[in-house]
């Protein structure tokens, strides 16, 4: 559906209880799964075609840049 990235527009942000804020969709990860960036945090987002908006999950869908090492605790 979306072919040109990045997409920068107002999106619903999970940590702000769905308030609309400026965020960026960087690329598509799968079926209705997108890599988004909000406030410097990379996370998952989905697109809702009924309201024509993206929903960014910066609360539970955060993507870490590196995997924890063998002796590091998983958090």
Image (cartoon, helix red, strand yellow):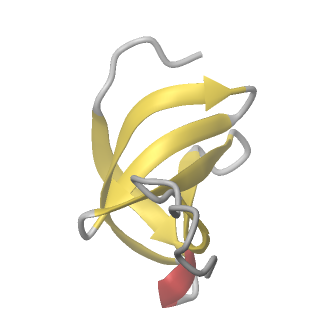
Q: Position of residue 36 (x, y in %)?
A: 43, 49
Left or right: 55, with 50 as reference point: left
Seen in the picture, residue 37 relative to 72 is either above or below; the reply is above
The number of discs equals 0
How far from the left and from the top, in percent, is residue 55?
A: 58, 59
Picture quadrant where residue 17 is located: bottom right
Measured along the vertical axis of the image, is residue 72 above or below residue 29? below
Q: Relative to residue 33, is residue 45 drawn left or right?
A: left
**Horizontal and vertical percent position of residue 24:** 31, 47
Q: Is residue 27 left or right of residue 38?
A: right
Q: Nearer the viewer, residue 51 or 58?
A: 58
Up the image or down, 46 lies above or below 10; here it is: above
Q: Residue at x 50, y 19 (%)?
A: 2
Location of residue 20 (image quadrant) = bottom left
Residue 21 coordinates in the image, percent (x, y): 33, 70
Relative height, residue 42 to residue 16 (above, below): above
Horizontally, residue 69 falls left or right of residue 42, namely: right
Q: Residue furthest front?
A: 71
Name the quarter where the N terminus is drawn. top right
Q: What residue do we see at 24% from left, 64% from top?
A: 40
Could you say which is closer to the camera, residue 35 or residue 8? Answer: 35
Split into 4 quadrants, where in the image is the C terminus?
bottom right
For the point 55% across and 73% down, the residue is: 71
């Amino acid at each position: 559906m979306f072919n040109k990235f990045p997409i920068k527009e107002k999106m619903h942000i999970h940590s702000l209880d769905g308030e609309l804020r400026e965020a960026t969709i960087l690329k598509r990860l799968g079926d209705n799964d997108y890599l988004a960036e909000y406030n410097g945090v990379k996370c998952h987002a989905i697109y809702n075609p009924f309201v024509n908006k993206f929903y960014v999950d910066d609360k539970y869908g955060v993507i870490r840049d590196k995997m924890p090492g063998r002796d590091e605790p998983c958090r």
